[in-house]
Image (tube, rainbow, N blue to C red):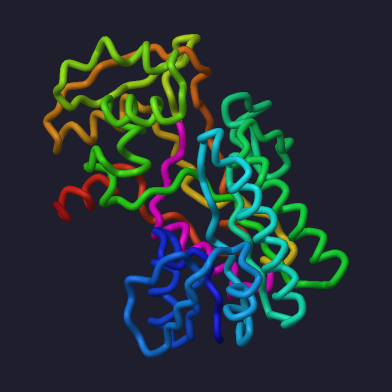
Amino acid sequence: MKVLVTGGAGRIGSHVIAELLRRGDHAINLDLRESAHRHANLTNVIGAFDDADAVARATADADAVLHLGALMSWVAADVQKMFAANVDGSHLLLQAANARKVRRFVFASSGEVYPETKPSYLPLDESHPTRPTSPYGMTKLLGEELVQFFNRAHGLPTVILRFSHTQDASELLDPNSFFSGPRFYLRARIRQQQAFGNQAVVDALAPYDDGQEKHLISRGQDGALFRMPITDARDIAAGVIAALDNERAIGQTMNLGTEEAIRIDDAIALLQRHTKLSAVEVVLPIPAVDYATSRARAIELLGVRPQWNFARMVADAARAN
């Protein structure tokens, strides 16, 4: 097949493209930057998802679309750009995919369509009410609605995958990484919250910063420890490929990620074996992120189980360092 992968230069997209090339498919990367892969069966289309010309060029010969790319931000100034990329861009891609009559359109949604800080019950499954609490989550829910409309109205073979929090193992020991830095390291969290304009969180963290790097064990305003699933990008990529291949996936919405919800103190303890950094425990003036996600539907329909738990991810990161 000729498979269009939006966001193919990203963490998940790069793993997906590697697998497509390994098995003999032709991959088309639509992204703002080229894929790191170099292969005769790889085409790069440089452009944004809401750029009609780039979308037309990328979908011209596509047999399937894996829409993995998105603009992800929690900065208020980025909200308008995020809606343009994630909602308008998804609509453009769906229109082009429908005109092309592709075999499959796989849409990467997010666990942020659920209220991850205020779940009605746990683990979060696909029947849980969708009540996003972030603009990013709202753009993903609107994207889901568009995908479902094209499935109903035009018979487009679609799949919706709700990704849990995803990281490359190599990020975990890097305080400067985009996701792992603020998740596990004090000074990176302070920089992130300053960029977001969350002064109350900065004020809670700043007294613990003595200029030396430390791990951060976060508690919510009620004292609850942060707890969440952290999924390896390789497991997400395997699920995406399975959704592309498996006829049972068509028309389905599925959570994709690990079912292991790890507490932040347990995660930090695993990291400390390698970083040797001290840790500080801080009560933040925000609700704790404390949830677990059910992967049962994806395991049943796709037949793919996660292979990397957090401990194995940390071990991989340590070997890479």
Q: Position of residue 68 (x, y in %)?
A: 54, 61
Residue 246 belongs to magenta span: yes
Give the residue drawn at x 43%, y 73%: 17
Q: Position of residue 41 (x, y in %)?
A: 42, 88
Give the residue drawn at x 74%, y 60%: 147
Specify the principal SS of the magenta part: helix
Residue 184 quadrant: top left
Location of residue 234 with respect to 241 vertically, above or below: above
Left/right placement of residue 155 relative to residue 316 reads right
Residue found farthest to the right: 153
Left/right placement of residue 49 relative to residue 282 reads right
Location of residue 83 with respect to 21 vertically, above or below: above
Give the residue drawn at x 67%, y 41%: 138
Give the residue drawn at x 63%, y 62%: 50
Which region shows up in magenta? Answer: 228-248
Residue 115 quadrant: top right
Location of residue 86 with respect to 13 vertically, above or below: above
Residue 154 belongs to magenta span: no
Residue 278 quadrant: top left
Q: Position of residue 1 (x, y in %)?
A: 56, 86
Total numbered circles = 0
Q: Position of residue 299 (x, y in %)?
A: 56, 57
Out of 133 and 106, give the one closest to the viewer.
133
